[in-house]
Image (spheres, rainbow, N blue to C red):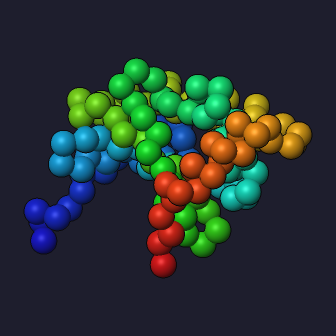
Amino acid sequence: ANASIVPTARVAGQRSAYWCRMKERGHLRWVMPHDEEPLLDALARLSVAGQVSLGEGTRYVGSFRAHGLLAPVWDLPLATGAEALEEPAAAFRSRLADVLADTTPLTAEQRRARSGLLSRQLTLR
């Protein structure tokens, strides 16, 4: 049982953001409190703008979905720990807040990005 435990640490300054290490990669899993549809729109806008990553060597990989909440997930370099994510996470939260306020219809490119985000979503039951 101990071999299956995933090392996890909370990212300081962020609500429901957790760093974890899975074999040869680090990950950030961040349960977002926003409604699912506006959050997907915002992530699509950030994706098209090239602003969905958390910095060099990171990659948005998809999200978990449970009880109407999304938990976006990023791949991180293995050496990245929870403490190194404080500033990138705060910067992402700021970018996200800006695009969440945008209620204009998505462009064709943003709609395609949103479809891609949906295809990388895993529903947990």
Residue at (69, 49) in percent of width and height: 39
Pick the residue in front: 5 or 123.
Answer: 123
Residue 3 is drawn in which quadrant?
bottom left
Pick the residue in front: 91 or 25.
Answer: 25
Residue 113 in sight: yes
- In the displayed structure image, the side of residue 58 where residue 51 appears, left or right: right
Q: Position of residue 6 (x, y in %)?
A: 24, 56
Q: Position of residue 81 (x, y in %)?
A: 30, 34
Above or below, 35 relative to 104? below
Q: Residue furthest top?
A: 56
Residue 16 in sight: no
- Count of marks placed on residues: 0
Q: Position of residue 54 (x, y in %)?
A: 48, 29
Q: Residue furthest bottom?
A: 125
Pick the residue in front: 80 or 86.
Answer: 80
Q: Residue furthest right?
A: 104
Residue at (34, 35) in percent of width and height: 76
Residue 34 is drawn in which quadrant?
bottom right
Residue 104 is drawn in which quadrant?
top right
- In the displayed structure image, the side of residue 89 where residue 85 appears, left or right: left
- In the displayed structure image, the side of residue 8 where residue 92 appears, left or right: right
Q: Position of residue 58 (x, y in %)?
A: 40, 30
Residue at (36, 25) in percent of width and height: 57
Q: Quadrant of the N terminus?
A: bottom left
Residue at (18, 42) in percent of width and height: 24
